[in-house]
Image (cartoon, rainbow, N blue to C red):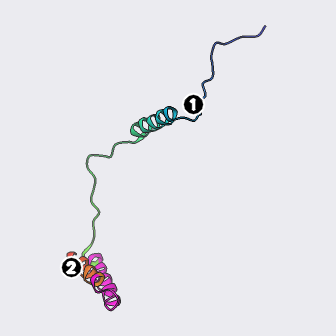
Amino acid sequence: MSASNNLTYTDFATPGYASNVAAAARQLVAALFAVKPRPAVVADEVVSPRQKASAAAWLNSMANDCERHSPSLSAELRFLASRG
């Protein structure tokens, strides 16, 4: 007395262009619906003036170190430090 079922197994691992496109579409849909939305209001990070001054001093120090071998990088670092 064996119970028979009418379910069949379908193998989606067959190589071919159509199966690859179908697998990519399934993965895309799964990725779209798996991501949770971000909250509407996101708090900005608060950076203290002391941290800004420290970062500017560090960038200026790096600019002084690379002045001889790459003046354009040095100028860029000084520009970033001045933006504060």
Percent across and percent down for residue 83 are: 20, 75
Q: Name the disc covering residue 75, or none.
A: none
Residue at figure coordinates x 25%, y 49% from the top left: 41
Q: In this view, does 15 lie to the left or right of 81?
A: right
* 54 part of magenta stretch: yes
Can you name the residue that lies furthest to the front here?
17
Magenta segment, which residues? Answer: 51-72
Q: How far apart are marks 2 and 1 (CA)?
A: 58 Å
Q: Mark 1 points at which residue?
A: 12
Residue at figure coordinates x 34%, y 85% from the top left: 62
Residue at figure coordinates x 31%, y 89% from the top left: 67
Q: Give the quarter of the figure containing the N terminus.
A: top right
Which of the pair 57/26 is nearer the observer? Answer: 26
Q: What residue type is labelled 2?
A: Ser
Numbered disc 1: secondary structure: loop
Q: In this view, does 29 lie above or below 44?
A: above
Which mark sits nearer the N-terminus, 2 or 1? 1
Q: What residue type is labelled 1?
A: Phe
Which of discs 2 and 1 lies nearer the camera? The answer is: 1
- Give the quarter of the image for residue 50: bottom left
